[in-house]
Image (tube, rainbow, N blue to C red):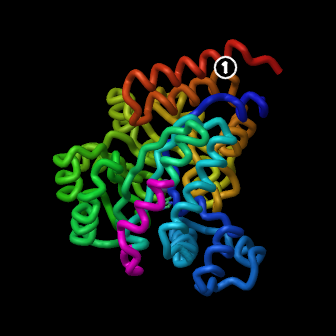
């Protein structure tokens, strides 16, 4: 099963580029930028990756971002992820970035997106990997800051496919951002939002009914509301589930308690993703492997998840079909 999981063609739909910033690269970039990291060594930093909840993780994640100053830094971080993604047989990945994490440190929006964009172009040329870009608003900041970010994105409209909502969930419901998402939708962006990771099912309802999202990121707590589950099934609403993230942030107590299999059995349209792989102990293949072993997923389940990843993506229908055919060809020719 390990070889099968590693080799099956797949897409990744929930990945924060700042969450791919590996400690080794962080120290290297911090050194060349003469930025002090509040940890004496790579090992000390890694030892701090022991979180009790989302906020404890976010505090370290935002601190790590302080090393990123120049276009080249964003290029290097993005390129390192895309290389890894290609090695894991990811054909297509939809990358989230948090511009406000950088603009509030006076790093220009242009510096951030230009570095990411150059890496996307080079990775397409060098590895054939296709990408989309999702700009996330930080929900612990206010609506006005989100409107300002949407404005700053305008000159780069052609490089951004969707707008999302991330950061500290509890106390920051999607309803706070209804108006700015309405504007984003009118401008032609696709929409996603983190909901039901730590927050209640009610936040998932708000993401559906007020934000009118095209996809829900996480969605774990949807299972507490049967009517919501039915609505998600009826709408064929994709949920981008992140098993190792849920384990590391204590959304689940143990990986064997993870609701992924239950979600599949209820007919929910789920995908498997890595979220912040540098912090949570694994990229997409490690997520598939951990959840397959813990929940005894079958080969058919893995095939379904791989197909779902393309079906739930923002690729056009022709490209979706091509990628799903590649999954089928792989399955038909695979022998262990
Ligand atoms: N930003 C990066 N990772 C996140 C997560 N898992 N939830 C909310 N915001 C995030
Ligand atoms: Zn996330």
Quadrant of the image occupied by residue 45: bottom right
- Quarter of the picture holding the C terminus: top right
| Label 1 C-beta lies within 8 Å of the nearest ligand 2 atom | no
Q: Is residue 82 left or right of residue 113?
A: right
Residue at x 53% of width, y 73% of height: 68
Q: Is residue 217 above or below residue 297?
A: below
Left or right: 5 with respect to 207? right
Magenta stretch, overall SS = helix
Q: Up-down: is 137 above or below 317?
A: below
Q: As rendered, which of 12 and 85 lies closer to the eye?
A: 85
The residues colored magenta run 103-118
Q: Position of residue 260 (x, y in %)?
A: 57, 38
Query: Tag count in the figure?
Result: 1
Q: Can I make out residue 192 in this image?
A: yes
The residue furthest right is 336
- In this view of the protein, can residue 202 be seen by the observer? no
Residue 79 point in image, percent of width and height: 58, 54
Does residue 37 sit above or below 255 in this rendering?
below
Residue in the image at 35% along x and 47% along y? 192
Residue appearing at x 60%, y 64% in the figure:
21
- What residue would you read off at disc 1? 330
Quarter-of-image position of residue 249: bottom right
Is-magenta flag for residue 219?
no
* Residue 117 drawn in magenta: yes
Q: Residues within 10 Å of mark 1 (few under 14, many from 20)?
A: some
Q: Position of residue 74 (x, y in %)?
A: 51, 64
Please identify the quadrant where the N terminus is shown.
top right
Looking at the image, which residue is at 50% across and 38% down? 130
Residue 179 x %, y %: 17, 57
Label 1 residue SS: helix
User: On screen, 20 above or below 293?
Assistant: below
């Amino acid at each position: 099963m390990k070889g099968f999981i590693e080799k099956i063609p797949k897409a990744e739909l929930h990945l924060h580029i700042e969450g791919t910033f590996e400690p080794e690269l962080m120290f290297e970039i911090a050194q060349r930028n003469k930025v002090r990291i509040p940890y004496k060594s790579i090992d000390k930093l890694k030892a701090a990756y022991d979180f009790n909840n989302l906020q404890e993780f976010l505090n370290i994640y935002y601190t790590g971002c302080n090393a990123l100053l120049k276009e080249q830094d964003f290029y290097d971080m993005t390129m390192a992820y895309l290389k890894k993604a290609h090695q894991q047989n990811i054909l297509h990945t939809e990358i989230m970035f948090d511009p406000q994490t950088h603009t509030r440190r006076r790093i220009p929006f242009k510096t951030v997106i230009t570095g990411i964009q150059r890496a996307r172009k080079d990775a397409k040329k060098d590895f054939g990997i296709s990408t989309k870009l999702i700009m996330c608003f930080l929900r612990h900041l206010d609506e006005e800051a989100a409107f300002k970010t949407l404005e700053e994105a305008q000159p780069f409209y052609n490089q951004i496919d969707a707008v999302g909502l991330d950061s500290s969930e509890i106390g920051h419901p999607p309803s706070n951002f209804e108006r700015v998402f309405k504007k984003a939708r009118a401008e032609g962006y696709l929409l996603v939002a983190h909901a039901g990771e730590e927050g209640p099912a009610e936040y998932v309802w708000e993401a559906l009914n007020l934000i009118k999202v095209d996809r829900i990121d996480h969605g774990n707590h949807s299972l507490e509301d049967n009517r919501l589950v039915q609505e998600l099934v009826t709408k064929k609403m994709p949920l981008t589930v992140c098993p190792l993230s849920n384990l590391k942030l204590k959304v689940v107590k143990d990986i064997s308690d993870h609701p992924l299999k239950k979600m599949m059995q209820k007919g929910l349209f789920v995908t498997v993703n890595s979220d912040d792989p540098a912090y949570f102990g694994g990229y997409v293949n490690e997520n598939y492997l951990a959840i397959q072993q813990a929940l005894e997923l079958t080969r058919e389940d893995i095939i379904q998840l791989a197909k779902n990843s393309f079906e739930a993506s923002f690729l056009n229908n022709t490209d979706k079909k091509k990628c799903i055919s590649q999954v089928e060809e792989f399955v038909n020719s695979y022998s262990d």
